[in-house]
């Protein structure tokens, strides 16, 4: 009868089969959280556990320490087509030899989650001579062009420009909450597109170089705004 379940990294690492059987027994499981209380960073295949609730799962939250995703794991994530809410982190570095995928391209699996209403995503990247680095920006633009039901988006990425926000806004007109972390600012033109496309926006977070100009523009553009956060400390 359980509808919510939290499994820790250690639980899965020590006995993955027991975790798989537990999730499989929970026929009504709608919310699953993968925690990481001991802050371990080892690679771990958690999707063999998660996919046992493929049909019933509506909300999936994965600790941000678990961020190195293989193409196979991302494909399984993309198969959870009944998801309404997803929270996870992703490292945009994948070995060149892995199924010919390069860097952030595997993020394109997110486009299959066409029922998604809440997306909280942190994208990071690092450099390694044995790895391939790929910009996540064009991939996420294609994802936002496919997802049409997003109401809340919270995204941190090192690869961005205004075109990402435009793609999100024009294809998700029911957007109510938008948190752009590590975005320095938006142009007036992009704010206008966001206002015209998403008139129901109630909450907005961004960092800004020109604080006074940004707050005046944003506060006047959205009549339903309840929460506006402009914080230069977000920007790296």
Image: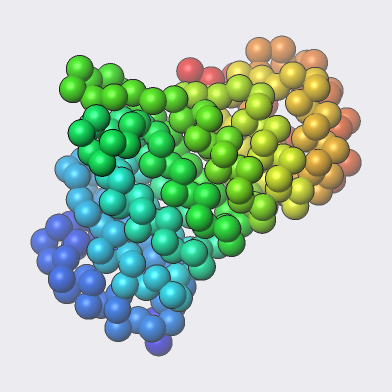
Residue found 27% across the figure and 44% down from its top: 70
Query: Residue 190: which quarter of the image?
Result: top right
Q: Residue at x 35, y 58 (%)?
A: 76
Q: Residue furthest left?
A: 14
Q: Position of residue 217 (x, y in %)?
A: 83, 24
- Relative side of 90 to 127, left or right: right
Residue 145 visible to an observer of this rendering: yes
Residue 52 x/y as whole percent = 31, 72
- The image shows residue 116, relative to residue 108, as above or below, that is below
Q: Residue furthest top?
A: 210
Asked if residue 41 lies left or right of residue 166, the reply is left
Residue at the outermost bottom position: 1
Q: Nearer the viewer, residue 164 or 101?
A: 101
Q: Is residue 225 visible?
A: no
Q: Quadrant of residue 216?
A: top right
Give x and y (percent) for residue 96.
24, 30
Task: Judge from the rendering whether residue 22 lies leftward or rightward of residue 211; answer left or right.
Answer: left
- Residue 106, image x and y in percent? 38, 41
Quadrant for the N terminus in the image: bottom left
Q: Is residue 100 left or right of residue 4?
A: left
Furthest residue in direction front, as rendered: 100
Residue sitting at 33 percent across and 31 percent down?
A: 102
**Quarter assignment of residue 35:** bottom left
- Image mark count: 0
Check the image and tell me how it is coloured: rainbow
Residue at 23% in and 38% down: 98
């Amino acid at each position: 009868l359980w509808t919510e379940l939290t499994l820790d990294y250690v639980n899965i690492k020590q006995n993955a089969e027991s975790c798989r059987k537990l999730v499989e027994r929970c026929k009504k499981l709608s919310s699953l959280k993968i925690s990481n209380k001991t802050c371990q960073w080892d690679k771990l295949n958690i999707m063999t556990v998660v996919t046992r609730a493929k049909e019933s799962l509506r909300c999936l939250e994965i600790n941000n320490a678990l961020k190195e995703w293989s193409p196979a794991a991302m494909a399984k994530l993309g198969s959870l087509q009944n998801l309404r809410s997803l929270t996870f982190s992703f490292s945009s570095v994948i070995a060149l030899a892995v199924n010919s995928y390069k860097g952030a391209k595997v993020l394109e699996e997110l486009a299959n989650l066409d029922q998604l209403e809440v997306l909280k995503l942190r994208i990071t990247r690092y450099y390694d001579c044995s790895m391939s680095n790929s910009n996540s920006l064009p991939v996420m633009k294609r994802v936002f062009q496919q997802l049409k039901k997003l109401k809340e988006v919270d995204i941190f990425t090192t690869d961005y420009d205004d075109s990402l926000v435009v793609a999100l806004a024009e294809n998700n007109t029911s957007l109510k909450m938008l948190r752009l972390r590590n975005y320095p600012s938006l142009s007036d033109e992009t704010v206008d597109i966001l206002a015209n496309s998403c008139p129901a926006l109630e909450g907005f977070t961004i960092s800004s170089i020109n604080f006074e100009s940004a707050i005046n523009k944003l506060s006047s553009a959205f009549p339903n705004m309840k929460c506006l956060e402009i914080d230069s400390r977000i920007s790296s």
